[in-house]
Amino acid sequence: MMLTEHKRLLKEQKKRALDVIQAGKEYVEHTVKERKKQLKKEGKPTNVEEDDPELFKQAVYKQTMKLFAELEIKRKEREAKEMHERKRQREEEIEAQEKAKREREWQKNFEESRDGRVDSWRNFQANTKGKKEKKNRTFLRPPKVKMEQRE
């Protein structure tokens, strides 16, 4: 199972590399064709450097290296982005766990202190029942009438 998987992976990598090489060759052929077309339009001779097989191979090599470099840069950027995303998700998970832990702790403390709160409320209620209610005071009361005493 493992061997066939590795074999398939190597075939895919080889196919990708051959595709990149083919793309480089096609790009160079296309640019040579375009340059010849431009020279013909201008009325100049259509001889270009890449007509020499050695220079053509060099141009294909350069273009292929550029394509491989671009692919490598894109791969590294993609990996960095994925790593950053995984890190962000992990931080979110940790934050959610900490929040849940704080919530459980708060709930636990709330439950443990319930008896104290209930007892306190009952004591308060018991104390207020025994006391007289105060009369409602009005804002202004007239002064008490005092009997005048004569000497």
Image: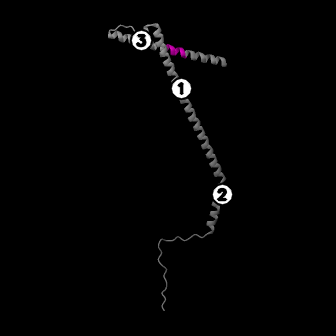
- Which residue corresponds to mark 2? 116
Circle 2 sits in a helix, a strand or a loop, which is it? helix
The scheme the figure's colours follow is one colour
Q: CA distance from mark 3 to mark 1?
A: 32 Å
Q: Give the magenta-colored segment's residue range.
A: 16-22
- Which residue corresponds to mark 1? 76
Residue at 66% across, 57% down: 116
Circle 3 sits in a helix, a strand or a loop, which is it? helix
In the rendered structure, find residue 144 and report the number of the disc placed on it: none
Disc 2 and disc 3 in contact, CB within 8 angstroms: no
Whichever of callouts 2 and 3 sits on the residue coming sooner in the sequence is 3
Q: Is residue 142 left or right of residue 79?
A: left
Q: Residues within 10 Å of mark 3 (few under 14, many from 20)?
A: some
- Which residue corresponds to mark 3? 32
Q: Nearer the viewer, mark 1 or mark 2?
A: 1
Quarter assignment of residue 36: top left
148 in magenta = no
